[in-house]
Image: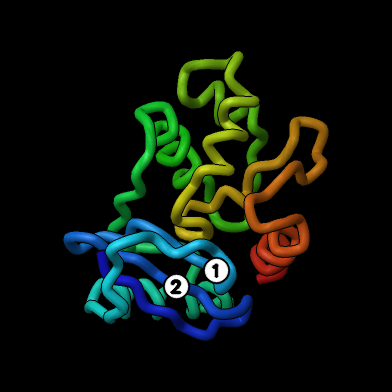
Amino acid sequence: MRLFFYQTAIGKIGIAEETGAITGLFFENDPMPKNVKIAESNTIKEAARQLNAYLLKELKEFSVPLAPKGTNFEQRVWKAIELIPYGKTASYQDVAKNIGNAQSARAVGTACAKNPVLIFIPCHRIIAKNGSFGGYKKGSALKTWLLNLEKNP
């Protein structure tokens, strides 16, 4: 695994890649994976370019290849979340219905919390059914910031 850090509008972010696909996004204080090589790759450079363009409101959809590791259920949830358009939100319940398991809203929340490629898979777009923001792996302040970024094009 390769990992390289970049300064962004939301702080220092590490982007990890394996075999040509992005597998992780790390914030400065996150625990680092073992057996990682600190090095850039073309895939990491492109992911960083896209991430910065997104944070500057110059990009609305990522095209970098993603390969997050997770269970089959988590993979289904993440694929459904990738389909939520820029500037839109969906509830945990909506995602549960979209993956064919309407009773799994809480499990959708857990899958969001395990998303290793935050922002690229936009779990920040998932909110509670009552319209409240719900949780976010990196805290409500970042979730609010990202939602506001997308709300005000």
| Frontmost residue, 113 versus 38 | 38
Label 1: which residue? 27
| Frontmost residue, 123 versus 62 | 123
Q: Is residue 151 at all visible to an observer of this figure? A: no
Type of amino acid under label 2: Gly
The chosen color scheme is rainbow
- Marks 2 and 1, the one that precedes in the sequence: 2
Q: Residues within 10 Å of mark 1 (few under 14, many from 20)?
A: some
- Residue at image coords 72%, 66%: 145
Element marked by disc 1: strand
Residue 88 vertical position relative to residue 72 in the rendered view, above or below = below
Element marked by disc 2: strand
Q: Residues within 10 Å of mark 2 (few under 14, many from 20)?
A: many
- Kindly indicate the quadrant of the structure image that contains residue 3: bottom left
- Return the residue found at the far bottom: 7
- Kindly indicate the quadrant of the structure image that contains residue 48: bottom left
Residue 43 vertical position relative to residue 20 in the rendered view, above or below = below
* Residues at discs 2 and 1 in contact (Cβ within 8 Å): yes
- Return the residue found at the far left: 19
Q: What x and y, as percent, mark residue 8?
A: 55, 82
Residue 8 vertical position relative to residue 141 in the rendered view, above or below = below
Label 2: which residue? 14
Residue 37 vertical position relative to residue 141 in the rendered view, above or below = below
- Residue at image coords 52%, 73%: 54
Q: What x and y, as percent, mark residue 58?
A: 51, 78
Q: CA distance from mark 2 to mark 1?
A: 6 Å
Q: What x and y, as percent, mark residue 147?
A: 69, 59
Locate the N terminus and report the quarter of the image it occupies: bottom left
Q: What x and y, as percent, mark residue 134?
A: 75, 42
- Kindly indicate the quadrant of the structure image that contains residue 47: bottom left
Type of amino acid under label 1: Phe
- Residue at image coords 40%, 59%: 24
